[in-house]
Image (spheres, grey):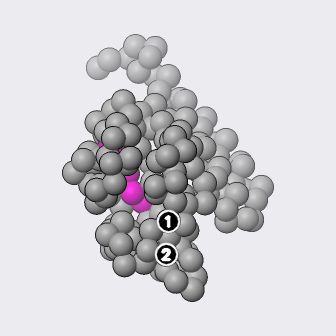
Amino acid sequence: MDRSPIRRKQPEKLLRLQRDLGVALSATSDQIEALNLILDATCRIEGIDCGGIYLADKETGDFDLVHHRGLPVEFIESAARFGSDSPQVQLVMAGKPIYGLYDDIAVTTDPICRNEGLRAVAVIPVKDKLKIRGALNLASHSHDEIP
């Protein structure tokens, strides 16, 4: 069993991150602020270097990007809104988290998104009670899987 200092530090770092996030979340009752805290915390995990939070428009069902981190302006502009009937939203509305290679999961043909160099992605539905309210998307430019 490998007990090197580097191997021990990773779980310790994740536990501190989880503790700090729990403290920060307990201090807010605002949904957007809470999601921002979650995105910022997850982007500090090794292997996750960018992401975005989408929330569903209550009237149209379209998904709007409300917070992002680590992506260029062109990508953000291209992925800022997805219609309720888009493949991206339908993927989230299935209600199951999806993890894998970006090229296997991405349902876009937009060259700006395709050429960003994302390797791994996680798409995690955000639920309130049993209703899907949006998605937390995480990605990596350097790793082939999301930890």
Left or right of 144? Residue 136 is right
- Marks 2/1 in contact by CB < 8 Å: the verdict is yes
Name the kind of residue labelled 2 in the image.
Asp
Towards the viewer: 10 or 90: 90
Return the residue at label 2: 62
Left or right of 20? Residue 96 is left
Spatial separation of the CA atoms under disc 2 and disc 1: 7 Å
- Residue most extreme to the left: 104
Q: Residue at x 29, y 20 (%)?
A: 1
Towards the viewer: 18 or 52: 52
The residue range painted magenta reads 120-124
In the image, is residue 76 above or below residue 107?
above
Q: Quadrant of the C terminus?
A: top left
Determine if the magenta segment contains residue 68. no
SS for callout 1: strand
- State whether the magenta stretch is mostly helix, strand or loop: strand
Q: Position of residue 27 (x, y in %)?
A: 77, 55
Q: How many marks?
A: 2
Q: Position of residue 40 (x, y in %)?
A: 60, 44
* Of the image marks 2 and 1, the number of the one nearer the N terminus: 2
SS for callout 2: loop
Return the residue at label 1: 81
